[in-house]
Image: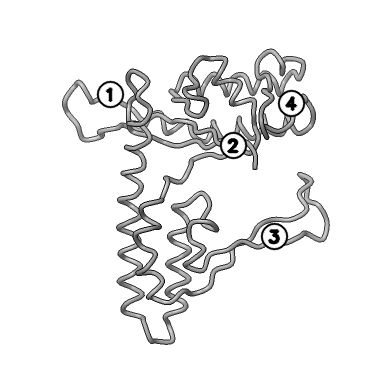
Amino acid sequence: MGLDVYLHRTRHQMYDDKYDEVINETEEDSRSKLAAKYAECVAKLSAANGTPEYDEVAIACVKELAELFSYPEFDLNELGYSNKFVEFDQPDDNGCRGEWQAIVTAAPLETWLKCAEKIIRHHYDKSVGYFRKVNLLFAYCQNRGILLDQYFAYIKKEEALDIIDRCKKVLANHELAEELLPTRSGFFFGGTDYDEWYFRDVEDVLKTFENCLPIFDEKVYPDETDPRWRDLTCNMYIIFSW
């Protein structure tokens, strides 16, 4: 339990705070991709069913589907996907004592057929960025006036560039943290101190948003010649969950 922050790419433009349209458009697009991939996997499994190659095909298919999910251990567990925490002999340079590794076993064809509708219906587009208890992003969206209903924020390129700029300034001068990227207390929101963990979060936010910048230059309709749509580009949105 805690504050989860998900960044999602969207082609939809938001008007009049109608954020449901932005989210639903993204879900519909991602579900179509999942349905096509799932059907492809079922066809492969049907052809391999009853042969020694079936398990290998099933495991490969689950790994392909896992790329479309933020948390495949929850969404694809009935198809044989799970995670196991493996401890390191000693902490790495970032202080991590281990890592989660995927474990995949082969589920029978009957399970694939039975779970198809549920998995596709409940699928939510894989995020392009994820943060855990990084409440400074919640505070940023709230202070900027782009937080809607306490869980949604529409991110244009100007917000992304502003967040990047603030992160760089805070990392260069820690005394600017409370002014530029203040923390926010809340139910399971995590720590609010400007300590080592805070500045690691700022580094993570900076890296993630820099990696996401190309999204804002992608054309919504790359083949569209109509001048009304020709220059329309993609954006992002944030979902806060706790």
Q: Residue at x 45, y 69 (%)?
A: 60
Residue 84 is situated, as x and y percent measured from the top left of the image, at 66, 63
The circle on residue 85 is 3
Q: Residue at x 58, y 20 (%)?
A: 140
Instruction: Name the amino acid, label 2.
Output: Trp
As measured in the structure, the alpha-carbon distance from the residue carrying label 3 to the one carrying label 1 is 46 Å
Mark 2 highlights which residue?
242
Pick the front one: 101 or 75 = 75
The circle on residue 192 is 4
Q: Earlier in the sequence, mark 2 or mark 4?
A: 4
The circle on residue 231 is 1
As measured in the structure, the alpha-carbon distance from the residue carrying label 3 to the one carrying label 4 is 28 Å
Q: Earlier in the sequence, mark 3 or mark 1?
A: 3
Of the residues tagged 3 and 4, which is closer to the observer? 4
Mark 4 residue element: loop
Mark 1 residue element: loop
Circle 4 crowding by C-alpha within 10 Å: few under 14, some 14–19, many from 20: some
Q: Earlier in the sequence, mark 1 or mark 4?
A: 4
Mark 3 residue element: strand
